[in-house]
Amino acid sequence: MPEKQYTYAVARIRAKENALLNDAFMEQLIGAASEREALSLLSEKGWKGRNNGSGESVQDILSYEEEKTFDTVLSMVDDPHAFDVFLLKRDYHNLKAAIKLTVSSGQIDDIFVEGGTIPVERIRTAVSQQDFSSLPDAMAEAGKEATDELLHSRDGQACDVIIDRASLRAIREAARSDHNSLIRRYGELTVALSDIKTAVRGADIAKDMTFYSRALAECDTIDIKRLSEAACLGRDRIYDYLENTRYKDAVEKLKRSFFAFEKWCNDSLMDSIRTELYHPFTIGPLAAYILARMSEISNVRIILTGKENDLPDTMIRERISKTYV
């Protein structure tokens, strides 16, 4: 897209940014007496769902907000695949769901998510017919391997590991081939932080090197061989390794709680995109807007879930991430 056209698109996004939920509003949501009151506050901000608030579930409302976000930004660019990197997780989630349903002969449809880069029905058909040729090569390879694993071992975790790693590799590949620095940073950060999460969880249940060799995805800012070796020896060795990387600030959060670490991961992503508030000529601000919206939708989901389950406000507050504005 020509630079001049990005300038116009960014100007439109700047107007949209004014409607993003800020920290003060998030605090207002947290302070709501009930889920119903929180939904009422969101309704005043335009969060009403496709049917304008008529008989819609929380998931309906949040899904529609995601859909609106991508529809809005894609309407501003010429390339319909410009932001596919943010949708790849959905494709691999659907692949995992299709495999598990097919192998277990399940009939549950609502575990699939729409809006990926590949239609859900194409993925389901590929899995049910054991013909993955209609899928991208990397996805087809992961789908076949995960299906074979689940059929032979009935090990759902092994299936998850295969597909989750393939998802991270796809995100990294898509991000590295993109010309925009924000999207490249997003890909690197996504893979690195996922590797750290996997290593910590694995260390907590004493996983061995074989597990890490299948679960961790390559990236530039983490040496997965050294991370794997550390994880085999326990959390403290992971901390020692991370102290010598750009992720050293994660150590204190991990020592506090996994929730604190999750929040730090999300905050790190927000910090990495905030510079786009000052870039008027590239696709970066559009990508940043998508990530900002995904983060605020995630925050709202956490708050509403907390209200539904009567969690203390302090517990909800420690789980939500920074806002973009």
Image (cartoon, grey):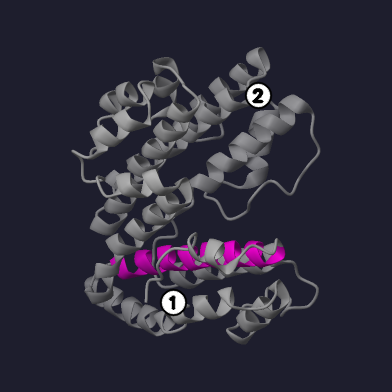
The local crowd at label 2, few if under 14, some if 14 to 19, many if 20 or more residues have their Cα within 10 Å, is some
Please name the amino acid that badge 2 sits on.
Gln
Q: Position of residue 313 (x, y in %)?
A: 57, 68
Does the stretch in magenta take in 16?
no
Q: Which residues are magenta?
A: 284-308
78 vs 173, nearest the viewer: 173
Q: Which residue is mark 1?
A: 23
Q: Name the image quarter holding the C terminus.
A: bottom left
Q: Residue shown at 20%/40% (left/top)?
A: 245
Q: Name the image quarter holding the N terminus.
A: bottom left
Q: On the rendered structure, is 169 left or right of 184?
A: right
Q: Mark 2 or 1, which is nearer the eye?
A: 1
- Quick check: can you spot residue 48? no
Image quadrant in which you'd find residue 60: bottom right
Q: On the rendered structure, is 54 left or right of 79?
A: right
Q: Specify which label sits upstream in the sequence, 2 or 1.
A: 1
Judged from the image, the secondary structure of the residue bearing numbered disc 1 is: helix
Q: On the rendered structure, is 213 left or right of 128?
A: left
Q: Which residue is mark 2?
A: 130
Judged from the image, the secondary structure of the residue bearing numbered disc 2 is: loop
Q: Residue shown at 35%/66% (left/top)?
A: 288
Q: Position of residue 25 (x, y in %)?
A: 50, 81
305 vs 4, nearest the viewer: 305
Q: Position of residue 92 (x, y in %)?
A: 54, 40
Q: Disc 2 to disc 1, how far (Cα)?
A: 48 Å
Q: Residue shown at 33%/52% (left/top)?
A: 186
The outermost residue toward the left is 244
Q: Residue shown at 46%/38% (left/top)?
A: 167
21 vs 312, nearest the viewer: 312
6 vs 243, nearest the viewer: 243
Image quadrant in which you'd find residue 238: top left
Does the stretch in magenta take in 288?
yes
